[in-house]
Every structure is written in C-alpha cells, then in structure tokens.
Amino acid sequence: MLKIAHNITDVKTGGIALRGVRKRYGGAVAVDGVSLDISPGEFVSLLGPSGSGKTTTLMMIAGFETPDTGQILLDGKDITRLPPHRRELGIIFQNYALFPHMTVADNVAYPLRMRRMPKAEVKSRVDRVLEQVQLGALADRYPHQMSGGQQQRVAIARALVFDPPVLLLDEPLGALDKKLRQHLRAEIKALHKEVGKTMIYVTHDQEEALAMSDRVAVMHEGRIRQASSPRDIYSRPAELFVASFVGEANLIPVKLKGGVAYSPDGARLEATQWDGDDAEAMLCVRPEHVRLKLAGVGAAPGLHGAVVDSTFVGDATVIECETSSGLRLTSKVLNQPGNPVPSVGSSCVLSWAQTDATILTQ
Amino acid sequence: MAGKMISLATNAAAEASRPPPRVRPTGWAWLLLPGSIFLTVLFVMPLLGLLLLSLGMPDWTLAHFLRIGDSPAYATVLGTTLEISLSVTALAFVFGYPIAYVLTTGGPTLRTFLLIAVVLPYFTSVLARTFAWIVLLGRGGVINEILLQLGLVSQPVTMLYNRVGVIIGMTHIIMPLMILPMSTVMSSIDQRLLRAARASGASSLAAFLTIFLPLSLPGVIAGVLLVFIYCLGFYITPALLGGLSDLTITMEISAQVVDRLNWNFGAALSMVLLVGVLAILWIGSRFFPIEQLLGFSDGKSGSDAAPRRQLGTRWLMHVGSAANTLDRWLPSMGGRGVVILASFLAVLLLLPVLIVAYLSFSSSPYFVFPVPGYSLGNYQAYLSDTLWMSATFASIRVALMAAGMATVLGAMLAFGLSRGRIRGRSAIVALVLSPIIMPTVIVAVATYFLLVRVGLQGTEFGLALGHAVHAIPFVVVIVVANLRDLNPAYERAARSLGAGPLATFRTIIAPLVMPAFIVAAFFAFLTSFDDVVYVLFLGIGKVTTLPMRMWEGIKQDISPTISAVATLQMAFAAIVIIIGAVLGRRRNT
C-alpha cells in the first residue's frame, strides 16, 4: 500500500467549482452547461460513456481546453483562462505519460526543477516521495523498464511532489488487466485517505466509480445527469439514463394515476409514493430486488408469470421471467441454501418492496 | 528521388508496434528468388564491376586513387561537394523543423495544407523544380524583375550559375526529404507527454525544449543523414544551377565517364563517393535503423527502437527552467509564431512550381511576370513538336516496361519478405532498399558499364532495366506496408470455409492488396517517367525521353515550352497522389 505523508497545513484548499461550463467543437456540443461544486478533500468521479464530455470537462479544469462560456474556480479564484502550468493541479494521465527519455528520479524532479527549486531541496523531496511510493531503489530506471503498477506509482509521485491541492485522474486504469486494476484501485483509494487531497477521477467504468468515490457525477451528452453518493446513484437514479447506465435495471412502462403506478394491463404495482401529476412513466427495479416465488406455495401477491431462462453466474442465478401480461422481468437470486432455483417453464410470482421501485418520468 | 515513399510510410509507422503476423515458413520464401536475382545481376554485379574498374582491371593498380589524392583540383571538387552538402543540410534542417513540427501538431486544415505543400513538390520531378528555379533566379528572372520593379536594386542580382543558386535550389528540392522522416518520428510522440509537462509547471516553451525536442532527435538524425547523403550524390540541380567554380563530384564523374571516356578514373571517383556514403550510413545506423528511415518497418521495429539514451537530462532541466523564467517576461506568442512561420515556409515550398504553372499559360514567348495575357501557346507548341512528342512516347514506353518489371518483381519480394521467414532476411532487405539510398549517379554509371558490355546501352529496354532497379524499392515499401494490414486470419478463415490456395488468393488476398499494387505501379511509372540521371548514362545519344529532352532544352535555350511540360509533369504527379489517397482511404473505411 502507498504511504504518502501529507502537509495538513491547510485542509481547506482544493475546492473546485464549475459554473455553467460549455464547450463546442465545430457543430458538436461536447460539454453543455456543466455546474458542479467539489469541496476540498472530496473524491468525485465523472462517470459516463465515451463522448459524454467527461474528459473534455477534466481537460478544461486542467487548462488544456478553454470553455466557450462559464467559469472554473479554484478555491474561489477564477482560473478559467490561466495557462495549465500556472494552475498547480496534479494530473495523472491515461498510460501515465511518463517522460521516456528521463529516469524515474528525473521524472519526479521535473515539476520542482520547473519551479526553480534549489537543487538540494529537489533532491530531498524526490528521495522522500520515492521512498513513500516504495520506489527508492528504482530511481535510476527508465519508465519502459518498469511494470504497469510501478509506472502508476511514478506518475503519482510526479503529480504529488509539488504538493498540489487537487489531483486530476484521467482514466488511469484504462489500459490494464482486471486483476491489476483492482489492486491499483485500492492503492488510489488508500492514497486519497492518506493525503486528503481533492481528487477528480474520470472513468467509464461504473464499478470503479461506485467503489472509490465520495460522489459520482454521471454524464451523458455533455451534461451531468445526476451527482450524488454512489449509493444514491444506484438505488435512487434520478432519470432513465442513470438507471440504465449504472447497473442492471428492470424498466417497466407504467401509468401514474393518483400517485399510484399501474402496469399496461391495469395491475397495480408496488412503487415509491408519487407526488406529481398523472403521467406515463417508467418503473425501475434492480434484479436483485425482484423476489421470486414458485407458484402454488400459497397465494402470494405480485405478478404471475413463467420462467423463460435461467443463467448461473457463480454467486447468483439470473432468472428471466415473462408475466401473464407479456412483461419481461429479470430476477437475480443469490445461490444460498433455501433460495429457489426454478427450472425453465415453471410458474412463478414476482414481487418487490415498495421502497425498491423508483418512478422515473423521463 | 531517394526515399520518396517515406510519406506513405508515415501511417504505417503508427502500427509498427503490432506483433508480426504469424507465418508459414518456406513456401512464400521462393517468391524472393526472381527479384533477388534481378537485383544481384543489375545492381550488385555492376557495383562490383565498378570496384574492379576503379582498381584498373585488368592491370591492377591504385594509380587512379592516388591521382585523386595528388591533384589539388580534385581536393577542390571534394571540398566544394562537402561545402554545398553541409550548407544545404543545415538550411533544410532550420527551415524543415518548424514545418515538420506544425505538420504533426497543428489543426486538421493546417496539416492538410502543409502536407500538400510538402508532398506535391516532392512528387514533381527534380528537373521540373530545377527549371522553376532557373526561371525565378535568372538575370531576367521573376525575382530580379520584382526587385527591379520595386526599386530595391538598380541592376539585376546574379543568383544563377553560382553557389547561391545551387544552395537555394538544392535546399528547396531537398526539403521534403528532411521534413518527412522528422514528422514521422514527431507523430509518434505522445501529446500527453507535453500535457504532463505543462501540468508539472512547464511553460509551453520549456515543455518543447525538455520533452518534444529531445524525443524528436531520432527523426532529426534520420532527416539530416538522408539529406546529406542525397546532397553528396546530387547531380541535376548543381549541374544546371551551378557555375564553373561549383563543380561537384557527381559532375566530375559524369565528365570523366561520358565526355572523356576515362572509365577507370570515373570508377575510382565513384568509389570515393560510395565509400563516403556507406561510412555515413554506418554511423547513422548506430543511431537509427536505416530501413525504417526508408519507410520499411515490418512489425518488429517500433518507436521503442529509437535510442533512449541519457541525453544529458541535467542540462535539459537547466534549459527548461531557464525557459520557464522567460515565460514570466514574454507574452505567450510562441504557438502562433511557429504556425505563421511554418505556413510561410510552406508557401515558399509550393511557390516555385506554382509560378512555373502560371507562366506556362503566358501569351509571351519570354518569362515576363506578371504575364501579359493568357494563352495555350506553350501547350500547342509542345503537342505539335514531333521531337517533344517522340520523346514523350519514348518515356511512356520505357516507363511502362520499367513499371511492369518493378511491380511484378517488387510485389513478389514484398510477399516473400512479409510471409517467408528465412535466414539472411535482413540481407535481402538491405539489397532491396539499397538502390534508393546509393547515389543515383553511381548506380547509373555502374549499370552503364554493364550494359555497354552486353550491348544494351542506348536501348529503351536497357534503360527500363535500370529504372526497374530504382523502382523496386518503392514498390516493396508500399506493398509491405499494406500486407501488414492483411491479417493472415482472413486467409485461414477462407481456407476453413473450403477455399483452396488459389481461390484464397483470388478471393481474399488479391482484392485486399490490389489498391496497393495499383499505387505501387503508378509510383514505379512515375520514378521512371521523371528520371534523367539514368538516361544521361544508359541512353545517351540514342534514347531521348521526355526529361532528356527537357534537360537538353534547359541547357541550350530556356524555351517556354519547357514550362508547359513541367506543368504537365506536376499535374501527373498530383493525379498519382490523388489516386494514392483515394485508394488508401477506400481501404481504410
């Protein structure tokens, strides 16, 4: 694990604010009015599919792109038009962008030399930070002589050595295999705990975003669709895109009448209370929240249907059912003693708790 | 025309890191045989003959080499050659670097413009471009006329038939050779490295000096080497633009062999030039893989092959941090300035050929600028002149023969090199690529001696043989680059679906590589069609091709008909570029 000492001289620095930031390339709008407040020390992920504007947003914070309109503030100071080398932000790039013609020590010394720090201090700082990332013995190696995990540590050391209040991470785990990703994910999370710096993390991997962040901002077509805690994003998606992009979801078209949801054939469905007007909407239920009972074991309330497919996925079984009204619903049942494993064709009853079904109007 | 294919290989360089395709060993290797024999007979043997001739065969002696050493006249010739080559290389680097830089880092529109500005002159024949400089630099030329009209000078400035003219003309003609290898290397530099430097607190100037410049050094070395070698063996431009005191070694070789029939001494001079070039290549190969310099990269050589030496990082850091302080004082003008400079230089690169095209439509029999009126007179004169026409047809016949031989043999070599793993493969690569890196004059002289012995000197077929040797490397480079994209899995899939070897070739391989064959054939045709050096030796007095007729025309009187011919050559080159681009795009989509 990484051990990086930090200066808790001023924990309050490192707040980033985006105010109505917009960026277009030619005719295409890449970022369409993004506003987000990130508090000092917070770990925020920008999550979205490719082309959602998350990387452009990060590059505008870093200073490599200039917004057409809107403002970017660092601790209340407008940095929208400040060139990147004056911003004092640490960036960890995809594939790390380590300078191939410089040794590890020179890579890490680079930011300090550019700041014209005295040689002796450069050396002691570099030695210290390399010790902290456990690369002290490899200081004279070149980047291409190192493993992916070691390269990430060099990148971290280089981004931290000048003690920036904010770290920007641009899909740093993008190109690695699954085992290493999980390991490095843990390292980054531990690093955040250690140094307490603000971290803005761009990824298209929902698992990564949910596992690491204090807050996840889901982006789609240049806008932030929802920014909340990972738990909220998953269990209370604010809109259809978030529900379908993050995790698996059963989406059932419903009619809302008097605050109650009805299926297309008029059956009443359990759902959270709806306070709005009558409308057409979607009901979102996660597969693991769909309870499945075999028919005939008492008259259970719920939707009646039949099992059409059953897939074993290791820790659980994913069962697909078709209700009598023609809806397709998926239920995920943990493979535990006592849980039913119905065969294809058997009749079943599907139900869920009221609080597990979210109504989405768009 | 050495290294013409570098431009086409730039795309391929990006894919160079892909592992080489798995191959079935022996079968394909047989394809190497015909081309290797052809090159051995028409390239290796003539050069060996040249060596023997220089040693006085059959009366062995070192007298000819001693004579070169003794006579101060030849020391002067060697000195002049080195002086011109060094100045041209230095100038081409200074002007070429900013163009290459913007060519790889600029926006898409700017890049397209720069690419055209580099590639169009590059594909236009050296003779046409040299002619452009005669029209521009002469006493009554375009530049003097403009200077006089502006009142900047009272008398015409002498810029032609002296050192100034040679250096201007050669630098202009050589620029693409400097720019293309540099931009190939530059485009492999990850732009994120520069962003990482900026994020670490480096100003854009400091980031350039500490990151981009050192990483582009392999390209700089490649470009400088290529240009220097090419300058040493340059014949056409110094012969046409230089004065009496600008005699270079190639002119001396030509004079000894053709005018004075002093074969042994001419061969000795050729050996001196050849050894010089080989020595430079040997030194260069320690910094940069030579075959990659010619656009021949077949999988195993990627950007990692570039040297990663300790480039005095301490020193770099000093430069960088100094540049960073400068940033506090200077307004950030850097980016814009480089773009404007590169665009200006690119316009200069295009201008000479464009001016010739413009003047070719003049109604005046003289090169008056601006033209008094427009007319197609020059084109009519060209089309109605039987000498020009018969020269054109001779060129077409020779080029068709040469392109036919080069395409068939080159394609077989390319397949053999890509698919057949045999021992001594690198020796064959060296053999195949050598004809374009050796000075054309030397190869032409050597071939001349061989063809005279077998009675083929002065025949169109003999000339086509020489041109085919020169065109084969281009064909191989183009086809190899395309075969890399031809995944052997397609062929295996076809075989598993019931296609026999022949059906697989007909239905899978042929359609996929056909565009490359067509481009390669056009290229081979163009190399032959534009050549004048081989004709001067292999066809002298007997075969008059179009460039030969132009050469004579330029030496006798600078007739405006030549401007029409040069313009047509340029148009033809443009058509070849467009065909290449269209076929390349269709394949990629």
Image (cartoon, coloured by chain):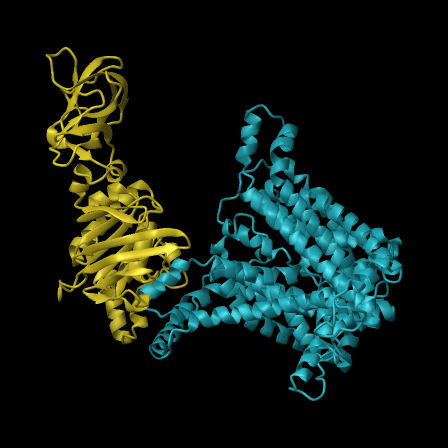
Chain colours: A yellow, B cyan
The answer to which image quadrant residue B26 occupies is: top right
| Whether residue B343 can be seen here | yes
Q: Residue furthest bottom?
A: B154
- Residue B79 visible in the current orientation: no
The answer to whether A131 appears left or right of B128 in the picture is: left
Q: Nearer the viewer, residue A279 or A114?
A: A279
**Image position of B380 with respect to A265: above or below:** below
- The picture quadrant where one finds residue B531 is bottom right
Question: Residue at point 20% right, 18% down?
Answer: A341
Viewed as shown, does residue A347 lie left or right of B293?
left
Q: Residue at x 24, y 36 (%)?
A: A247
**Residue at image x 64%, y 33%?**
B505
Residue B10 versus residue A263 in the image, above or below: below
Total numbered labels:
0
Quadrant holding the N terminus of chain B: bottom right
| Residue B275, position as x, y percentages in the image | 69, 66
Quarter-wise, where is residue B178 in the image? bottom right
Image coords of residue A270 (percent x, y): 13, 26
- For the residue pair B331 and B466, the one nearer the viewer reads as B331
Position of B81 compared to A232: left or right?
right
Residue at far top of view: A296
Left or right for B291, reference A282: right
Q: Measuring from the top left, give residue B303's x and y in whole percent.
A: 48, 55
Indicate the position of residue A172 as horizontal and vertical percent values.
31, 51
